[in-house]
Image (cartoon, rainbow, N blue to C red):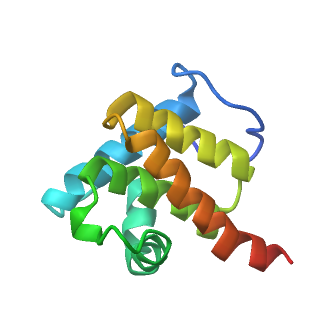
Amino acid sequence: MRAKWSTSHTKMVTKNDPRHQLRQKIVSDLFAWNFHPQPVSSEAQEVVDALPNIDKIIESCAPEFPKDKINHLDLAILRLAVYELTIKKTEPLKVIIDEAVELAKEFGGESSPAFVNGVLGAVVKNYVEPERA
């Protein structure tokens, strides 16, 4: 049985939480897809389908880092988080950002958590907050 996206998630989850494990799987799918476009899980496919818009947002919020220069794992994490922040919109902003930073700590390089946090902060400031106003 596959875990489902939750709308009741209001706090940081542990690494054993099914929602966190689902995010790990989606990031893994997106990472692999970046090298070899192939069928992915339905949740990851939702992100892939929205990549033109998601990548434009990432590029505008990290202009000093062209998409092809961003670490592929950081890019997968950002793509999922930007999807959740701007399209899915079912989780609190803080939870989405905390989860993305946690994934960056788990799988990324030393600078990944700060980079992911900074880009997502710009996404919230430039794309999410204006929409809420």
Residue 2 visible, this angle: no
Q: Residue furthest right?
A: 133
Q: Is residue 1 above or below residue 57?
A: above
Q: Is residue 41 above or below residue 103?
A: below
Asked if residue 17 lies left or right of residue 12, the reply is left
Q: Residue furthest left?
A: 36
User: Residue 64: image x %, image y %?
Assistant: 36, 71
Question: Looking at the image, which residue is at 31% across and 43% down?
Answer: 28
Viewer-proximal residue among 103 and 83: 103
Residue 61 visible, this angle: yes
How many discs appear? 0
Question: Looking at the image, which residue is at 47% across and 55% down?
Answer: 80
Asked if residue 73 lies left or right of residue 102, the reply is left
Question: Looking at the image, which residue is at 86% across and 78% down?
Answer: 133
User: Residue 130: image x %, image y %?
Assistant: 76, 78
User: Residue 115: image x %, image y %?
Assistant: 44, 50
| Location of residue 33 by image quarter | bottom left
Question: Looking at the image, which residue is at 59% across and 65% down?
Answer: 122
User: Residue 108: image x %, image y %?
Assistant: 33, 37
Q: Is residue 100 above or below residue 11?
A: below
Q: Residue furthest front?
A: 64
| Location of residue 105 by image quarter | top left
Viewer-proximal residue among 44 and 96: 96
